Image (cartoon, rainbow, N blue to C red):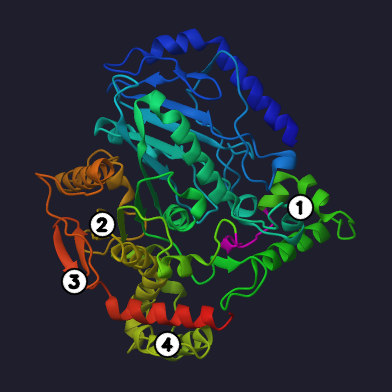
């Protein structure tokens, strides 16, 4: 089945080559365009001209299909092709639940450019989508890059392996590795995409020396990872992390307990053993072969918990240690969160019924390390339980790791800028839930929204683009945004009103930092 799927993709690509002349004509139909076809290291491609003059190139392979023996391997170079590849169709989404148009053959990216020529040297922005490292794709409509391209940058969006395909470690996989490691395949996909950008983006009018990586939620966690790993050093020059998703359970050590989670290899080994037993292959003498013989659906159903794995290679130390000691990749940074992140995840009907229940659960969770956290994240009355749960989810999953990034960069010579997004267009009286900022960032709001929302979208897109151009979101005509400093701890509040705040939830986040540090230290 894996081979058949790949052959279908190859045949589809050769069909595109037969209509390459038509596609080339179409690509020249816009108001301004890079002269096609574009020469890549792996072959030539043509794109599609939009009415705005922007050209979009969809479904460009940036790595070989990670199928067969390449499943659970670092990505390999894309397979070269002859002729002109018509890049007019998004590549398949990576394997995930509830999706039809998906495949293991999914390592494709997309480029939007409004450059007049290949010599224009425009800033480049590389988007990494969210979805808990289990869902999502670069083809999502909200991630359309046309507005970014019209605003003076080249937008690249990328797919990457997710779930058990992208974030599972296993002793058998580590044993076959020259470095004795496994896991982090999705992060290695990001690095392969950035290498592709370095080697090819000039052909689209982009500057390989001015690349901004940005992502949201799990994509923000990927930005966190790329800032931490030495393997990405020099491949990007600015970073934006929206709602950085780093939790007590999505970071692990390869082969030992880290104080909050058992090892990544142990998690993978248990998941694979259970699946092989289900498939009546539990007595297989070659576990690795059995793993690679699994269908894609079997791998998808492993249910392994996704995590960044401290493996001594992608992450020589834990990311938290890397940021604490200042050995991360130092670049200008924007990082922020929405002021009601947890509204998307905490359901009123599912929260604790009484303060006593909530306190008991927190005491069990914190396991003697709670300290002041029990004062901060246990409600004073039953009526306040839901609000406290929303704050706890927001702080632990998103606000704390966002501040970790900002503070790590503020201790260097690079500027860092922190924000809190406050707009909820569906109910302006409520706080802004997780992912609410995305349509504003891409300036892709639906028709009929209020004028204030259109203004916010233009402002956020302008901030992001100005930062990509210069490493600073400030320019004439935009509300001033102060850099974050360890003493003032200023951040920009972005919504219907734009103003500055300081020391965002500082006492709560300080105590969460202390708690996590103590838990990790307990395992060393």
- Magenta residues, start to end: 301-312
Q: How would you rate the neighbour count of disc 1 (Cα within 10 Å): few for under 14, some for 14-19, many for 20 or more? A: few
Residue at mark 4 = 354
Q: Earlier in the sequence, mark 1 or mark 2?
A: 1
N-terminal-most mark, 1 or 3: 1
Q: Mark yes or no: residue 419 visible.
A: yes
**Magenta stretch contains residue 356:** no
**Labels 4, 1: front one:** 1
Q: Position of residue 110 (x, y in %)?
A: 45, 32
Answer whether labels 2 and 3 touch (C-beta < 8 Å): no
- In the rendered view of the protein, which quadrant contains the C terminus? bottom right
Upstream in sequence: badge 4 or badge 1: 1
Label located before the other in sequence (2 or 3): 2
**Residue 226 rendering spot, x and y as whole percentages:** 46, 53
Where disc 3 sits, the SS reads: loop
**Which residue, given by chain and number where applicable, does mark 2 sit on?**
415
Q: Which residue is mark 1?
A: 176
In the rendered structure, find residue 488 and report the number of the disc placed on it: 3
**Is the C-beta separation of discs 4 and 1 under 8 Å?**
no
């Amino acid at each position: 089945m894996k081979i058949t799927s790949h052959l279908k993709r190859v045949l589809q690509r050769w069909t595109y080559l037969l209509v390459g002349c038509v596609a080339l004509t179409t690509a020249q139909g816009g108001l301004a365009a890079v002269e096609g076809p574009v020469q890549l290291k792996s072959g030539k491609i043509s794109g599609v001209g939009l009415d705005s003059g922007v050209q979009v190139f969809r479904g460009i392979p940036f790595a070989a299909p990670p199928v067969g023996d390449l499943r659970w391997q670092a990505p390999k170079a894309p397979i070269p092709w002859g002729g002109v590849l018509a890049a007019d169709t998004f590549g398949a989404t990576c394997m995930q639940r509830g999706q039809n148009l998906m495949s293991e053959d999914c390592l494709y990216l997309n480029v939007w450019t409004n450059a007049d020529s290949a010599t224009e040297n425009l800033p480049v922005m590389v988007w990494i989508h969210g979805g808990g490292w289990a869902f999502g794709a670069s083809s999502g409509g909200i991630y359309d890059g046309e507005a970014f391209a019209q605003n003076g940058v080249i937008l690249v969006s990328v797919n990457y392996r997710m779930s058990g395909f992208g974030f599972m470690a296993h002793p058998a996989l580590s044993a076959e590795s020259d470095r004795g490691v496994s896991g982090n395949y999705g992060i290695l996909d990001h690095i392969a995409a950035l290498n592709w950008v370095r080697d090819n983006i000039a052909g689209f009018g982009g500057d390989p020396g001015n690349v901004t990586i940005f992502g949201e939620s799990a994509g923000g966690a990927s930005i966190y990872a790329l800032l931490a790993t030495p393997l990405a050093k020099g491949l990007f020059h600015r970073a934006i992390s929206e709602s950085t998703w780093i939790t007590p359970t999505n970071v692990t050590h390869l082969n030992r307990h880290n104080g909050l989670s058992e090892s990544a290899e142990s998690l993978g080994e248990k998941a694979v053993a259970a699946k092989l037993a289900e498939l009546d292959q539990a007595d297989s003498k070659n576990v690795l072969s059995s793993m690679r013989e699994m269908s894609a659906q079997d791998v998808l159903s492993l249910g392994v918990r996704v995590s960044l794995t401290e493996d001594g290679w992608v992450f020589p130390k834990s990311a938290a240690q890397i940021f604490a000691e200042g050995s991360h990749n130092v670049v200008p940074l924007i990082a922020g969160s929405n002021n009601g992140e947890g509204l998307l995840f905490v359901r009123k009907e599912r929260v604790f019924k009484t303060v006593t229940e909530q306190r008991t659960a927190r005491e069990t969770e914190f396991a003697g390390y709670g300290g002041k956290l029990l004062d901060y994240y246990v409600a004073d009355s039953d009526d306040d339980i839901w609000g406290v749960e929303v704050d706890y989810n927001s702080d632990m999953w998103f606000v704390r790791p966002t501040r970790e990034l900002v503070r790590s960069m503020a201790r260097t010579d690079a500027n860092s800028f922190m924000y809190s997004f406050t707009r909820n267009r569906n109910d302006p009286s409520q706080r802004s839930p997780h992912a609410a900022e995305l349509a504003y960032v891409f300036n892709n709001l639906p028709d009929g929204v209020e004028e204030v929302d259109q203004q916010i979208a233009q402002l956020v897109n302008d901030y992001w683009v100005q930062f990509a151009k210069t490493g600073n979101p400030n320019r004439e005509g935009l509300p001033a945004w102060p850099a974050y400093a360890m003493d003032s701890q200023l951040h920009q509040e972005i919504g219907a009103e734009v103003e500055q705040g300081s020391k965002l939830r500082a006492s709560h986040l300080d105590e969460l930092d202390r708690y996590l540090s103590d838990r990790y230290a307990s395992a060393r």
